[in-house]
Image (cartoon, grey):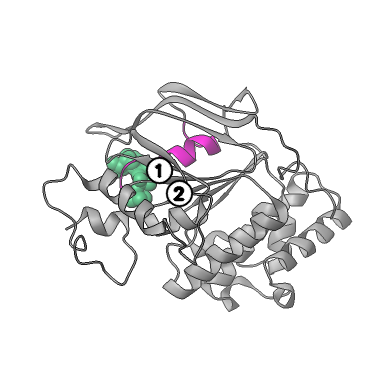
Amino acid sequence: MGRVLPFASQDADPGVLLDVDDVTLQYKTESRLVTATYKVDFQVHRGDRFVLLGPSGCGKSSLLKAVAGFIKPVEGTIRLNGALIRGPGPDRMVVFQEFDQLLPWKTVQQNVVFPLRARGVPAREAEERARAYIAKVGLDRFRDSYPHTLSGGMKQRVAIARAMATEPEILLMDEPFAALDALTRRRMQEELLQLWDDVRFTVLFVTHSIEEAIIVGNRILVLSPHPGQVKAELNSHTFGHDKSEGFAALENRIHTMLFAEQQHPAPFRGAPSPRAPSVTRAARP
Ligand SMILES: Nc1ncnc2c1ncn2[C@@H]1O[C@H](COP(=O)(O)OP(=O)(O)OP(=O)(O)O)[C@@H](O)[C@H]1O
């Protein structure tokens, strides 16, 4: 493999990779104009695990789609490495929540090879790179399996391997673990962190789970409810599943930030739930 540099942050470059500047996103439907985000600003540096966190409908997925180049801001700009994003490009890869993002008629290996060949990577290199990334997500034994024979978690691992194998500048993940059971989700979060330790890629990660944001992210952008506006940007680089000192404090701080002005407090406040708070659950008392 050997060619991880374009994807990785192996230098100490503190420069901005992704610059989202004053971005307003809108959708026009037949009956109305929906403002998804309003004047959102943030900057992602190389090697960041940057999380967009906020309640359902605050425009997290819309921001990710705009960075992917699928939708255009009505106001503001998005730049990657200084260049204006005008559409989708090979420098960005998206991992979605849905398990059906793989090609069902192709094996795991073929699924990972496919986008590499489409980008002009020579056959042998594509095969080798696919093998290496499939190994990184622990699926060597399933290289010749078809997607319908894999569990949800395994399919997401393939989707991650496929995206990583293209070695994009930034990996865009839209609630990639949200449809998994709690234990698998936790394992996937750990594996993502291990992968990051290994490859040091840059990721923009969308979630509505406060716990997931703190575990996965080194920086968290907290967005207000619809239309999404920036509430705060926080550092979270010292936490993992061990929930070391300060985890609960940060969790509470974010929770308060998101729901302090709500008239009805979330049901688990004052009576902590054994499950981690999620923005969606909290937003629907
Ligand atoms: N294609 C669309 N047409 C019209 N409105 C849309 C479209 N996609 C999203 N919206 C609206 O834009 C707003 C933001 O949606 P978006 O999916 O980005 O939010 P989100 O924070 O990702 O929500 P969730 O966590 O529920 O996925 C919502 O009000 C949504 O209804």
Q: Nearer the viewer, residue 252 or 135?
A: 252
Magenta span: 56-71
| Residue type marked 1 | Lys
Above/below status of 109 relative to 53: below
Answer yes or no: is residue 126 visible.
yes
Quarter of the image that includes the C terminus:
bottom left
* Residue 206, label in figure: 2
Give the quarter the ligand 1 occupies: top left
Disc 2: CA contacts within 10 A as few (<14), some (14-19) or many (>=20): many
Separation of marks 2 and 1 at Cα, in angstroms? 6 Å
Q: Residue at x 45, y 64 (%)?
A: 243
Q: CB of residue at label 2: within 8 Å of ligand 1?
A: yes
Q: Earlier in the sequence, mark 2 or mark 1?
A: 1
Marks 2 and 1 close (CB-CB < 8 Å)? yes
Q: Is residue 247 left or right of residue 43?
A: left
The image shows residue 217 at horizontal and vertical percentages of: 51, 50
Asked which secondary structure carries label 1, the reply is: helix
| Residue type marked 2 | Val
Quarter of the image that includes the N terminus:
bottom right
Q: Residue at x 45, y 54 (%)?
A: 214
In the rendered image, which residue does mark 1 sit on?
A: 60
Where residue 124 sits, quadrant-wise, is bottom right
The image shows residue 135 at horizontal and vertical percentages of: 74, 68
Q: Is residue 70 magenta?
A: yes
The image shows residue 197 at horizontal and vertical percentages of: 67, 56
Q: Nearer the viewer, residue 72 or 238?
A: 238
Q: CB of residue at label 1: within 8 Å of ligand 1?
A: yes
